[in-house]
């Protein structure tokens, strides 16, 4: 038997035989998901296929998170289509309103994804679940329609890039900085249709939430998936979330990789990705763009409780610059409640932040923080494409929670050590 990468190992179990990179396989899925933007497209394709029932009402998830709370009539209609489909199909995992949150923070929190799973979603950041030892990838709505109907998808088994992070992280350097460093190193197409497999002492020390931040942005390097071993931390996280009987998974010693990238994290500084690509990365101290008008702390990348704690530690006792609107969006209702109980919400509001509901909101230029012509934003989100958050003449700078919070106070790009 050959030594297998994480991608090969997980896919092989689902197919029932050993798979090799490059072959096209039909693969059973553990979960198929969509959101309020992509679900209506999948539902239409589902009907056009002549499908009458989903393959398993307990293994389809619909999360209303992008344009919700519904910002206009069109978005309300999108949610209505999704809600009615969920009711017709008896879908158990339909989330809207006070039960909903940003999908890629919500599903792990609810114990719906875990090690050895194959998860497909009509959202490119489905790769987030790779942090839990799942093979997770985004697909088009038509593919998800097929997955909802048949319980399987076809895909090409990806080759893997081994990404080794060693050393101990300096103060205010976070998982966001690790993934930004990697994207700057290999480029936004450096892992196109490849699996990024993360390992090393710094990864072992990283929290599961930090691993989710890194897996989330695998797609920003073009990756098909971003994969972490399911170690003791992963299993504990999954057990606490209610995932049934999580089992460890790791790559085999001697597995073959297309290439290897190595980083000593002890040499890193807090980083910023400048417009208009996530690969355009500089140290925060060298990324001064002049006055900024908005900061966003949240999203499926950095809206978890650890992210909010880091941002609050910087904002405590300080005030957001009068020229900046700082928007904080906890990623799920449960994270919101934790932040409230820990006093983080009070810290944000005392600093002058706007604290909003669990929604994607401004990340995709949806609502709750659209940029005007000429405005600049520092965001803990995952993309800074031209026009991503509003006007084509606006600018987005991607950063971790510490840099975002410090920038809100300084009124320009800054790290906590510069305040």
Image (cartoon, grey):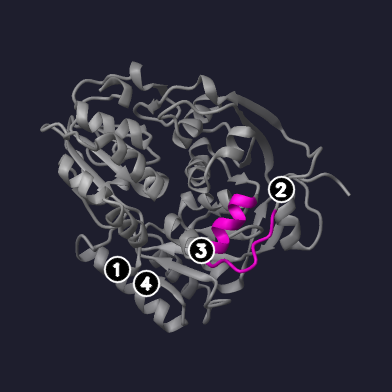
Magenta-colored stretch includes residue 239: yes
Circle 3 sits on which residue? 241
| Residue displayed at 35% across by 65% down | 100
Q: Earlier in the sequence, mark 3 or mark 1?
A: 1
Q: Circle 3 sits in a helix, a strand or a loop, which is it?
A: helix
Q: Residues within 10 Å of mark 4 (few under 14, many from 20)?
A: many
383 vs 149: above or below: above
Circle 2 sits on which residue? 250
Can you name the residue that lies furthest to the top here? 286
Q: Earlier in the sequence, mark 3 or mark 4?
A: 4
On the rendered structure, is 12 left or right of 79? right
Whether residue 375 is visible to the viewer of this picture, yes or no, is yes
Q: Residues within 10 Å of mark 2 (few under 14, many from 20)?
A: many
Q: Circle 4 sits in a helix, a strand or a loop, which is it?
A: helix
Circle 1 sits on which residue? 98
| Residue displayed at 89% across by 49% down | 1
Report the Cα–Cα distance between label 1 and label 4.
16 Å
Dot in front, 3 or 1: 3
Q: Earlier in the sequence, mark 2 or mark 3?
A: 3
- Residue 299, x across and y down, in percent: 36, 48
- Residue 92, x across and y down, in percent: 46, 77
Q: Camera-side residue: 344 or 130?
A: 344
Residues rendered magenta in the picture: 232-248
Q: Camera-side residue: 396 or 168?
A: 168
Whether residue 397 is visible to the viewer of this picture, yes or no, is no
**Are the two marked residues, 2 and 3, in contact with CB atoms closer than 8 angstroms?**
no
């Amino acid at each position: 038997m050959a030594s297998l990468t994480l991608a090969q190992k997980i896919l092989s179990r689902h197919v029932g035989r050993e798979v090799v990179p490059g072959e096209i396989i039909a693969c059973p899925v553990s979960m198929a998901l969509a959101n309020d933007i992509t679900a209506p497209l999948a539902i239409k394709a589902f009907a056009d296929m002549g499908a009458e029932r989903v393959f398993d009402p307990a293994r389809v998830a619909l999360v209303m998170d992008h344009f919700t709370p519904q910002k206009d009539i069109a978005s309300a209609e999108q949610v209505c289509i999704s809600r009615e489909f969920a009711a017709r199909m008896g879908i158990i995992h339909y989330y809207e309103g006070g039960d909903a949150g940003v999908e890629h923070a919500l599903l792990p929190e609810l114990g719906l994804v875990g090690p050895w799973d194959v998860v497909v979603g009509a959202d490119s950041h489905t790769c987030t679940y790779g942090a839990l030892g799942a093979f997770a990838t985004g697909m088009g709505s038509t593919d998800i329609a097929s997955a909802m109907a048949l319980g399987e998808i076809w895909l090409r088994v990806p080759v893997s890039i081994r990404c080794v992070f060693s050393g101990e992280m300096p103060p205010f350097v976070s998982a966001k900085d690790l993934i930004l460093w990697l994207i700057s190193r290999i480029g936004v197409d450096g892992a196109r249709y490849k699996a990024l497999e993360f390992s090393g002492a710094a990864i072992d020390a990283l929290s599961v939430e930090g691993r989710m931040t890194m897996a989330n942005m695998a797609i920003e390097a073009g990756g098909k998936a971003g994969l972490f071993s399911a170690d003791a931390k992963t299993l504990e996280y999954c057990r606490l979330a209610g995932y049934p009987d999580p089992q460890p998974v790791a790559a085999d010693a001697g597995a073959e990789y297309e290439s290897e990238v190595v980083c000593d994290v002890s040499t890193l500084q807090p980083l910023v990705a400048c417009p208009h690509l996530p690969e355009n990365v500089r140290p925060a101290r060298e990324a001064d763009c002049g006055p900024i008008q908005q900061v966003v702390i949240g999203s499926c990348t950095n809206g978890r409780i650890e992210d909010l704690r880091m941002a609050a530690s910087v904002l405590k006792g300080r005030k957001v610059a009068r020229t900046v609107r700082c928007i904080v969006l906890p990623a799920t209702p449960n994270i919101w409640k934790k932040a409230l109980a820990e006093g983080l919400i009070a810290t944000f509001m005392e600093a002058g932040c706007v604290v909003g509901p669990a929604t994607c909101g401004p990340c995709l230029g949806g609502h709750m923080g659209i940029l005007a012509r000429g405005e600049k934003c520092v965001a803990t989100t995952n993309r800074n494409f031209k026009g991503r958050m509003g006007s084509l003449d606006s600018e987005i700078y991607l950063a971790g929670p510490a840099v975002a919070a410090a920038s809100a106070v300084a009124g320009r790009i800054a790290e906590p050590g510069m305040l």
